């Protein structure tokens, strides 16, 4: 069995630790010793008091689940351990640090991945598989909304990484899944325009609303709406093509009600092609971890590569630049 080290024991780190424990031996490290011990005890894992001792454990794989401004420094510290690494999204908060990281990684033998769990959401998988049915795609509209204070009910939302500029977040960098799966659907992006701002009375210093337009290299346009304002969590996607339309709508969280429908011009009828009254919140994370384990065995996997993470970060940072400069940003 492989040894997997989880660095960072917040809510996401705990989820990764629990899922990793189904596939191998798990070690955990967090700056909080109490949290480290509690998470290790909950999964019968190995706690570590510092990163040095954790790396001396010689893990085969490492998951970095710390605030994203610390991702690159931590990964650079771990590269000498020889383990494959998976970083929570986004890969970083600036392009320069990622370029430095990828240059260093190329000199090593390790593989580097970025967490994109929405790749493994059943609705995203269904749409990707059924895209050929609607012929040449014209445009897509996607949305994600979730009320920030509801995201962690037992914590003060003002302390969330997503709510603080010093952590480099805001809804544009936090909600990057939409851009990732749109790149998988339609390929790379050549131009970005965006309006992003703080619209609410929430006590945060980052944007809580954004509307982004992407022009893909193949001519498809994607419209992306993101917010921290909707009282009920909602997520979805609509793709319009020359032969039909695909529509995904998810509402709520625990339970999440999820439906994907297909309309074909030829029949003039809607068909429900996927439905769940209680979508398994953890299932995409389980599939993500199973793919990471495959990577540790050098098997073919569908994880987001570091290059994918960099491309998505470039798009999201271009969106913020577009909003600030009030102009379209063209990507090289």
Image: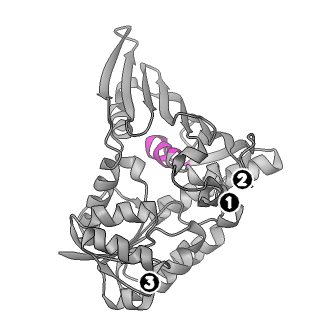
Precedes in sequence: disc 3 or disc 1:
3
Q: Is residue 258 above or below residue 54?
A: above
By secondary structure, the bulk of the magenta-drawn segment is best described as helix
- The residue at 60%/70% (across/down) is 69
The mark found on residue 204 in the picture is 2
- The residue at 75%/42% (across/down) is 201
The mark found on residue 78 in the picture is 3
In the foreground, 289 or 222: 289
Q: Which element carries disc 1, helix, strand or loop?
A: loop
Residue 318 showing in the rendered view: yes
Which dot, 3 or 1, sits closer to the camera? 1
The mark found on residue 164 in the picture is 1
State the image coordinates of residue 64 (x, y, percent, origin top left): 45, 71
Q: Given contact means CB atoms under 8 Å apart, are the residues at marks 3 and 1 in contact? A: no
Give the CA distance from mark 2 to mark 3.
Answer: 33 Å
Horizontal side, residue 318 vs residue 246: left or right: right
- The residue at 23%/65% (across/down) is 299
State the image coordinates of residue 148 (x, y, percent, origin top left): 60, 46
> Which residue in the rendered view is the most extreme toward the left?
1
Q: Given contact means CB atoms under 8 Å apart, are the residues at marks 1 and 2 in contact? A: yes
Give the CA distance from mark 1 to mark 2.
Answer: 6 Å
Give the CA distance from mark 3 to mark 1.
Answer: 26 Å
């Amino acid at each position: 069995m492989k040894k997997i080290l989880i660095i960072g024991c917040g809510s996401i780190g705990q989820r990764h630790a629990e899922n990793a424990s189904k596939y191998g031996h798990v070690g955990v490290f967090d700056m909080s010793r109490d949290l480290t011990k509690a998470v290790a005890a909950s999964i019968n894992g190995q706690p570590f008091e510092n990163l040095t001792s954790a790396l001396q454990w010689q893990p085969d794989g490492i998951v970095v689940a710390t605030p994203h401004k610390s991702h690159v420094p931590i990964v650079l510290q771990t590269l000498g351990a020889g383990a494959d690494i998976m970083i929570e999204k986004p890969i970083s908060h600036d392009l320069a640090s990622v370029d430095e990281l990828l240059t260093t990684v190329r000199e090593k033998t390790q593989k580097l991945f970025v967490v994109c769990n929405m790749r493994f959401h059943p609705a995203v998988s269904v749409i990707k598989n059924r895209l050929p049915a609607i012929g040449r795609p014209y445009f897509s509209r996607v949305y994600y909304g979730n009320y920030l204070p509801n995201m962690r009910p037992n914590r003060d939302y003002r302390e969330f990484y997503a709510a603080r500029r010093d952590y480099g977040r805001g809804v544009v960098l936090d909600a990057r899944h939409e851009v990732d799966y749109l790149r998988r659907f339609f390929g790379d992006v050549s131009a970005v325009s965006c309006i992003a701002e703080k619209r609410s009375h929430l006590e945060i210093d980052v944007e809580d609303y954004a509307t982004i337009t992407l022009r893909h290299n193949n001519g498809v346009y994607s419209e992306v709406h993101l917010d921290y304002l909707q009282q009920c969590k909602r997520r979805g996607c609509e793709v319009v093509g020359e032969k039909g339309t695909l529509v995904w709508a998810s509402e709520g969280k625990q339970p999440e009600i999820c439906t994907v429908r297909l309309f074909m011009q030829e029949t003039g009828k809607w068909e429900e092609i996927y439905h769940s009254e209680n979508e398994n919140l953890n299932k995409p994370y389980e599939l993500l971890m199973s793919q990471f384990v495959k990577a540790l065995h050098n098997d073919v996997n569908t994880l987001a590569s570091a290059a994918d993470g960099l491309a998505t970060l470039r798009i999201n940072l271009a969106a913020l630049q577009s909003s600030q400069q009030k102009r379209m940003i063209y990507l090289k």
